[in-house]
Amino acid sequence: MVADVLQDPNVRGRLHKPSRGKMVTDPDGSNCSYRGCGGKRCGGKHVSMFPSSDTYHNYSSPGFNVIERHNGVANVGFADGHVKAMKHATLYNNGSKAPYFNYSE
Ligand SMILES: [Zn+2]
């Protein structure tokens, strides 16, 4: 339901689903893989808001945006009220909805 996220400036505060695709940075927000004009790689670390209108990012999205902001894990709050510190890769599960995002919409 809620989690630490690398904010998407296009939709602030939104927790993207795994179907949004792999996050474009490492799970801690470092090593951004976006390329700007001329093919130069950003390579930066983004830990709060994903950049939007600069040369590299051009209103793009960070992808599945749970970020490991606290000693290698993210705080995650579930609809049933429990809260847990989790790894990005566990939640992303190679882009699968299961087991954390396979609720009815
Ligand atoms: Zn970047």
Image (tube, rainbow, N blue to C red):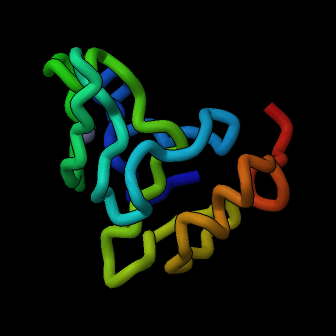
- Front residue of 1/100: it is 100
Identify the residue shown where x is 73% and y is 54%. 94
Ligand 1, image quadrant it occupies: top left
x and y, in percent, of residue 87 in the image: 54, 73
Identify the residue shown where x is 79% and y is 49%. 96
From what the image shows, is residue 80 above or below residue 105? below
x and y, in percent, of residue 57 in the image: 27, 25
Quadrant of the rendered structure where residue 99 is?
A: bottom right
53 lies left or right of 66: left
From what the image shows, is residue 40 above or below residue 90? above
- Front residue of 41/52: it is 41
Quadrant of the rendering where the C terminus is positioned: top right
Identify the residue shown where x is 66% and y is 69%. 90
88 lies left or right of 62: right
- Front residue of 37/66: it is 37
Identify the residue shown where x is 43% and y is 43%. 24
From what the image shows, is residue 102 above or below residue 71? above
Q: How many marks?
A: 0
Quadrant of the rendered structure where residue 29 is?
A: bottom left
11 lies left or right of 53: right
From what the image shows, is residue 93 above or below residue 43? below
- Front residue of 6/43: it is 43
Q: From this viewpoint, which residue is outermost toward the left? A: 54
Q: From this viewpoint, which residue is outermost toward the bottom? A: 71
Quadrant of the rendered structure where residue 93 is?
A: bottom right
x and y, in percent, of residue 35 in the image: 30, 29
